[in-house]
Image (cartoon, rainbow, N blue to C red):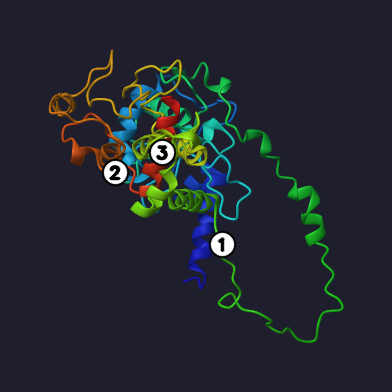
Amino acid sequence: MSKFPNLLTLSAVAILTASPVLAEGLGIGRTALPDEIAAWDTDVRPDGLGLPDGSGNALDGEVIFSERCAVCHGDFGEAVDRWPALSGGQDTLEDDRPVKTVGSYWPYLSTVWDYVNRAMPFGDAASLTADETYAIVAYLLYVNDVLEDDQFVLSKENFLTVRLPNEGNFENDNRASVEYTVFNDTCMTNCKDEVKITARAAVVDVTPEETKQRALEKAIREVVKSRATPDADEVEAATTVTTTEVTEEQPATTEDAVAQSETTIDPALAKAGEKVFKKCKACHQVGENAKNRSGPVLNAIVDRVAGTFEGFKFSGAMKTKGDEGLVWSSDNLSEFLEKPKQMVPGTKMSFSGLKKDSDRLAVIEYLKSVSE
């Protein structure tokens, strides 16, 4: 018996791979049939070679993604727990801990299609049809702002017209010509007599102090802190003025001062909220040309009666809440955004919710800003 069984096994595999006829002569396996080879030959190249017929758009992909992928990757690719994020991260590649997603890092769309097709969903790999894969890939493009039209039909015919944002930052691997020759000619002379350990990882602080996400959260907290409600004496002192001191920009009464404070938009907080709103863009639009999607337009949502917006078909549960007098005040919006299905059981909104107080406060401030 050989003392090197693993080596013997590897040699047999090498013979079988390199020369099927020789392998058969040794009684090891047989030549693979064309259909068997085709069943394994499913990879897709950057030039589109290997793509099957089929098509799908982001609207269909959202439904499939919600059913087959969201449990790990979140409703919008934002990730659940420690599973990988598939969206966002566009401004993080120079950070100490970059967020490498389809929209921020991946070079070729073929890599996305190939990986989803062969390896996903986790635990049920290769169970998606070609149409389902095209739809999921279109949805990932949409939540990463690569596609603006959720009805764009991705197919084999137009696949190569879509380019990922980071493709141009990849270069061909030139290590064989540049580095290997240097490494193979290493000169081991003038070495030190002994090696001393000068520091250990347990002592050296190798953890980055904060990422951009942490910086964003910190900025939101600071804004919130600066807007903390003063006590009654401070309000009275700040708003007590004589008639001659009242100007156009200065409220004449405490009530006016409070009203102005409630309607004033904090630009820094609204800007932070715009980034948080990316999690909402798959279903909702805001702005001058906004249209209803799978969710209603959110222009002037603050102080709107629940279940009311022209042209959108709300769930019966949401209409009932509106009939009962639910108005989307800032507090009610925050409660709904935290746990939508808990506040309005039966809502069509599939989003699981924004768990962080700072995220909810920021996105509500952004919605106020686009409603003006």
Quadrant in which residue 104 is drawn = top right
Mark 2, residue position = 338
**Upstream in sequence: badge 2 or badge 3:** 3
Residue toward you, 16 or 244: 244
Marking on residue 209: 1
- Asked which secondary structure carries label 1, the reply is loop
Residue 336, image x, y percentages: 26, 38
Residue 170, image x, y percentages: 67, 39
Residue toward you, 340 or 197: 340
Label 2, label 1: how many angstroms apart (C-alpha)?
A: 28 Å
Residue type beneath disc 1: Glu
Residue at the image point whose x is 77% and y is 55% from the top: 180
Residue type beneath disc 3: Ser
Work out whether residue 42 can be spotted.
no
- In the shown orientation, is residue 204 left or right of residue 256? right
* Few, some or many residues within 10 Å of mark 2 (<14, 14–19, 20+): many
- In the shown orientation, is residue 278 left or right of residue 108? left
Marking on residue 268: none
Residue at the image point whose x is 34% and y is 18% from the top: 292
Mark 3, residue position = 261
* Few, some or many residues within 10 Å of mark 1 (<14, 14–19, 20+): few
Residue 171, image x, y percentages: 70, 40
Question: Which quarter shows the C terminus?
Answer: top left
- Asked which secondary structure carries label 3, the reply is helix
Residue at the image point whose x is 15% and y is 28% from the top: 317
- Asked which secondary structure carries label 2, the reply is helix
Residue toward you, 253 or 345: 253
Which of label 3 and label 1 is nearer to you? 3
**Upstream in sequence: badge 3 or badge 1:** 1
Residue toward you, 190 or 215: 215
